[in-house]
Amino acid sequence: MSVAQQNNEMQAAEVQDAAAWTTIQRVILPGERGMETLPLYMDSGVVASAVEVAAGALPQMDDQGLNRTVHADDVLSRTTASVRAGERISFGTYFNAFAASYWKRWTTVREVRLNVRTSGRGTVSVYKSNARGSLQHVETVRVQGDAETTFDLSLVPFGDGGWYWFDVAAGTEEMLFLGAEWQTSAERRKTGTVTVEITTLNKTAFCINNLRILGSHPEALESVKEVIVVDQGTEKVRDADGFMQVRQALGDKLRMIHQNNLGGSGGFARGMYEAVENGSDYVLLLDDDVVIEPESIVRLGIFADYCKTPTLVGGHMFDLHDRNVLHTLGEVVNPYLIGPDEPNPGQRMRHNFARGNLRDTPWMHRRVDVDYNGWWMCLIPTEVIREIGLSLPVFIKWDDSEYGVRAKAAGYNTVSLPGSAVWHVSWIDKDDLVGWQAYFHTRNRFIYALLHSPYDLGGGLLDNSMKLDVKHLISMQYFTVRGRIEAMKDLLKGPDQLHAILATRLPDIRKIAEEYSESQFKPEVEDFPQLKSGRPPRRGRGFSAPSYATIVPWAAKNVIRHVAKPVKETAKEHPQAFVPHQDNKWWRMSQYDSAIVSNADGTGASWYLRDPKRVRELLGESVRVYGKVLKNWPRLRTQYRNALPQITSMEAWKATFESNAQDDVK
């Protein structure tokens, strides 16, 4: 065989080998409007081990992190960047590191290939970490000219945690990073199609923005069969500025559905229903008040395709108003107290990547297994929906956590996949445990417990809920307690009426709010009578929370005060104080007869006024209704569990959609 023939065969073999590798994650950079999030994509500076930083072997971070100066103007495109002479850029970041332990645990992939393209003289270095966050150098390759460098990397050591990532360092002259992909030759379980569904209520600007993002990133839509907007508001997305442009960009893939306000559960259930009907392999549920990272759609779908069994795959949530802050890495439900939004043991909430990147954060290297993923972004296989049904008909709250736990009980796990995320309005600017939302939180929390609690009487749920009622009462949050009592009354009526009240319960609850002063908001403090303080704090020390040793007698004393002691006449005419929302704590509010309290988002304030008669009535009613729930718990548990397949069925939801339909625009 001639040398030319040998060269041809070698080239053919190389081409065939390259064709056998499929890209499962490409390296990306932010667009022009997202440069403030550059630390999530790329950084530069020292190569630091998270363990070394935690142990103090390297300097502690200042406000700018470990001297990682990121040059936004070095970003050349969505996939390319320049590397300044003598400098290093690292892709050991949230969006570009490879979450090796997640792929090892949940997919059939056991080896990945990193393919890096560069131009110029420098080095490409690959690193990995273990579950403790300890950095390990894998390999460094010198490159020059136009180079394509590959690294074949095993996933075998990543049982409990760990990541892969790479750095590019320039020599004495500038070099270019031209792109990179993480690839696999493993067999793909399927190449699935996706229905992307957005549930919205009067968030037209958010929706138009996200549709515009999708329309300008066609690569994110390659596997998308439809983009469905379920519009339940009075301000229609189709009437908003920019709608015709996004319709033109998305073409036949965009479908608008208009229905009465059935809450998040009604909107998301509609997305599930339509995805099953149109034959999609997955439905991707998206909240409306988010900003999408479009590459996440690709990543969730590909990861799900390679999972060993059908798996729900969710994206993380970053703070829309502080865009480098990750809300949580993964959530579980406390089975005893039935509390949502709890980070896994060892995890921390609201991590700021601008202050400590992935390599600097040891706890982030351990794999996090979850009970559910929030429906701000969650991909669900339609075969799971066909087996276990759609969302509970509960309007809002607990629909996503209940569905994840229901799926898990049926053998379908949920994975919160790093590198896939949206930016969402932060919980900091919301207080959904008081006001009208308290009804849904309370009722749906109890429904969850009846369906899934491993304890005979719901564990510590009833005790915890009664204590919450007392806290709200001595905080003068009477409407909140009224809503919680109504929730228990509706719980006792059983599951058969959940569909019937889906569209009507919110207006009913809001009507009740008109009877309570703390639920009547005004924009300015001056809209209320002038403040006149009562007795000053003892020795000028202000208020403080009771200790564990004193809380029982302290609470008893304050409950008696709120039940029996008359309100001062001056407090009825003039609020005693102005209390900022962040200081609206039960142990503080219990000391006042009246106060003006600002709301969570700072748009207004309301007048809290102590009312002993109302406290007595609500406290008595609360005790009675919880007694009925406790007495009937075994019956209710059987009733709700038996009804679950029917109330979450395609047929039940179809009837609800038809009875709440508005005009449907294609």
Image (cartoon, rainbow, N blue to C red):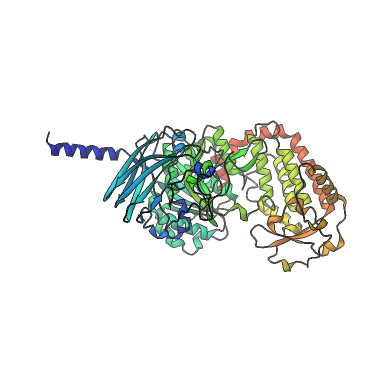
**In which quadrant of the rendered image does the C terminus lie?**
bottom left
Q: Position of residue 243 (x, y in %)?
A: 46, 61
| Residue 320 visible in the displayed image | no
Number of labels in the image equals 0
Q: Position of residue 161 (x, y in %)?
A: 48, 37
In the depicted view, which residue is nearer to us: 83 or 281? 83
Q: Position of residue 377 (x, y in %)?
A: 51, 47
In the depicted view, which residue is nearer to us: 66 or 10? 66
Q: To which quarter of the image does residue 407 belong?
A: top right
Q: Position of residue 378 (x, y in %)?
A: 51, 44
| Residue 501 visible in the displayed image | yes
Position of residue 659 relative to residue 310, above or below, is: below
Position of residue 72 relative to residue 650, above or below, is: below
Q: To which quarter of the image does residue 189 belong?
A: top left
In this image, 298 relative to 458: left or right? left
**In which quadrant of the rendered image does the N terminus lie?**
top left
In this image, 169 relative to 464: left or right? left
User: Residue at the spot x=61%, y=39% of the render?
Assistant: 333
Q: To which quarter of the image does residue 553 belong?
A: top right
In this image, 390 relative to 155: left or right? right
